[in-house]
Image (cartoon, helix red, strand yellow):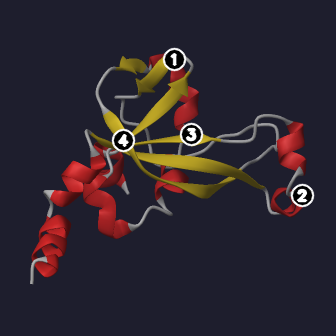
Amino acid sequence: MTGLSKKIKPLIVRTTGYYILHDEIPADESFLWHREKAIHFKGQISIICKKYTYHTFGYKGFFKPTMEECLKPFPSKYLEFLDYFSVEGPKDIHDLNLEPELLDKDLHKAVTTYYCLGDFNERYLNSSFGEINSSSSSS
C-alpha cells in the first residue's frame, strides 16, 4: 500500500474546487487531518467510478478515513489509471443512524470517488486494455 500512497493522492472537495494533499501521509492515518496543507488543484480530472467504503472509528462522532480504507475496494486491474480519490462520509447524526448495524461494528459508511488525471476514456483507449478491445473489435 505504501507504493500506492506515493502515486495516488487524496483530494479534498470544497465548493471552491479540488484541493490536493502532496505530503506523504501514512496509509493508516486519516488524510482529512491534514486538510490545512491542501493546495488548490487546477488540472483536468475525470471520474473513474464511485464505491461505498467502510471506515473504522474509535468514536462515532469522528470520521477519520485512511488511504488504505479508501483504496482497498478499487479494482486492482485499473490501478494504472488511478491518480486521485476523494471521500464523502456521514454529514451528521441522521446519516449515522440510517445504518445502525454498521455503528455496532464501529464502521462509518462513505462514498469514495476515484479519479484519473485527464480524460479517463482517452487514457483507457490508449492503454493495453484499449488495444486489446480495439484489436478484438476489428477482427
Image height check: is 106 above or below 133?
Answer: above
Of the numbered discs 1 and 2, the one sitting upstream in the chain is 1
Of the numbered discs 3 and 4, the one sitting upstream in the chain is 3
Of the numbered discs 3 and 2, the one sitting upstream in the chain is 3
Q: Nearer the viewer, mark 4 or mark 1?
A: 4
Q: Is residue 57 left or right of residue 104?
A: left
Residue 20's image quarter?
Answer: top left
Residue labelled with disc 3: 30
Image height check: is 44 above or below 127?
Answer: above
Neighbor class of circle 3 (other Cα within 10 Å; few <14, some 14-19, many 20+) is: some
Residue 25's image quarter?
Answer: top left
Which is more toward the observer, 73 or 106?
73
> Disc 4 versus disc 1: distance between alpha carbons?
24 Å
Q: Determine contact: label 2, label 4, CB under 8 Å.
A: no
**Horizontal and vertical percent position of residue 117:** 28, 39
Q: Nearer the viewer, mark 3 or mark 4?
A: 4
Neighbor class of circle 2 (other Cα within 10 Å; few <14, some 14-19, many 20+) is: few
Instruction: State how many labels appear.
Output: 4
Which element is circle 2 on? helix
Of the numbered discs 2 and 4, the one sitting upstream in the chain is 4
Q: Determine contact: label 1, label 3, CB under 8 Å.
A: no
Q: Amino acid at mark 3?
A: Ser
Which element is circle 3 on? loop
Q: Which residue is drawn at the image coordinates 9% and 84% (left, top)?
A: 139
Which is more toward the observer, 129 or 79?
129
Residue labelled with disc 2: 100
Q: Is residue 36 left or right of residue 123?
A: right
Q: Which residue is drawn at the image coordinates 51% and 15% (left, top)?
A: 16
Residue labelled with disc 4: 46
The residue sitting at the front extreme is: 138
Residue 36: mark: 1
Of the numbered discs 1 and 3, the one sitting upstream in the chain is 3
